[in-house]
Image (spheres, rainbow, N blue to C red):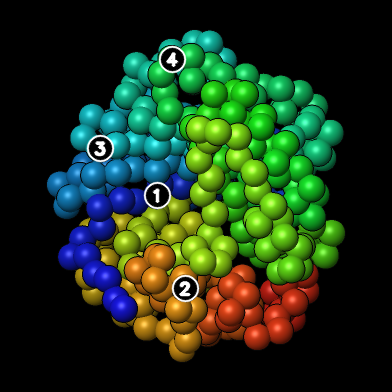
Amino acid sequence: MSLSLASPAKIALGITEACPLRCVHCYADCGEQPKPGELDLPAWLRVVDELVADGVIQFYIEGGEPLAKPGFLHLLARCARDAMTLLRTHGTLIDEPMADALKAAGLGRVLVDLMGADAATHERFTGVPGSFASACAGVRRCVARGIPADVLVILTRQTAPQLNAVLRLAAGLGAERVGVLRLYPLGRARRIWAEIAPSLAEQMAAIRGLEPPPGLGVMQSWHPNDHNCCWQSAAVNAFGRAIGCMYLREYADFGDVRAVRHLDIWRHHPLYRHLRSGRVERACADCSASQGSDGGCRAAAYAFHGRWTAPDPFDEDLNDGVDLRVLPERLALLA
Ligand code: SF4
Ligand code: SF4
């Protein structure tokens, strides 16, 4: 099965790799200061103008921590003027005035990361005391202003026993959904992989044990939901590089959107076209039937097998004995 789009309808903008938290697993290896070469506000505004002109109707703004980016609210308002705009944030910077400003700028949905159902677990990851309470308060403040909110939680050995508590917490905060996310071997997560990565059996047990409170939606990408969403995915990182998807951040670089229009990169870059073609070595029939695409996540497949067409090892039908607690040697060497 292959799906195709002439141009991307949605795009993720990773607008900075600065963040005031110090997460031990940070995929972007963020520090407090922006990294050299990050696009400034005028450059982002030009990129967004082109993307809107080329048909983008949804922006997903993330980081790093987007709220730490100078000019963030201006950029948000520009995106929201012409497109549904989502924001992924750690939430701690959403005080009352910021929640008002997000609403006024037209934010369509906020997604707040929690790394556990209690302060001890969350802050063991973030390294910042008080970040759990302020993240929860950030969700509440958005909900109070009518901004739809989701909570995101990465499935690790530490969060696995707490997933149902996270669901209850999110429902109590007024969130509409919880997204349970896979752990990827990116950035600082590689350095502590052996401590935090669950086996596939542990992951499946955690997913099958989910009991959402009435009215709370759950998003997850394990069997039979192992999305191969490359066919529609587009992303630009903090340095203006088109990378297809934030989970491809260490594997793909399709070009500089300041030098070549993103739509031209989308249409012509051979690897980008290949990833969107949906061609894979094997697929799980149940996942293909539910997702309309084959083979699962390409970033996960490439991370563990080093081949773009390989089976996704997070799918139990395609795992082929891969132990997800152990990094492949070439990734371990990067850690
Ligand atoms: S909150 Fe997100 S961006 Fe900030 S350090 Fe943690 S993982 Fe990185
Ligand atoms: S790399 Fe994975 S998550 Fe990203 S677009 Fe492709 S399939 Fe989806």
For residue 223, side relative to residue 124 (left or right): left
Q: Earlier in the sequence, mark 1 or mark 4?
A: 1
- Which percent across, then down, holds residue 192? 80, 59
Judged by depth in the image, the label closer to the viewer, 3 or 2, is 2
Given residues 280 and 41, the one toward you in this image is 280
What amino acid is labelled 3 in the image? Ala
Dot 1: few (<14), some (14–19), or many (≥20) neighbours within 10 Å? many
Q: Residue at x 60, y 23 (%)?
A: 173
Q: Residue at x 35, y 58 (%)?
A: 234
Q: Secondary structure at mark 3?
A: loop
The residue at label 2 has a CB less than 8 Å from ligand 2: no
Residue at mark 2: 286
Gap between marks 4 and 2, in whole Å? 40 Å
Residue 145, numbered circle: 4
- Which percent across, then down, holds residue 82? 21, 35
Judged by depth in the image, the label closer to the viewer, 4 or 3, is 4
Q: Is residue 65 visible?
A: no
Judged by depth in the image, the label closer to the viewer, 1 or 2, is 2
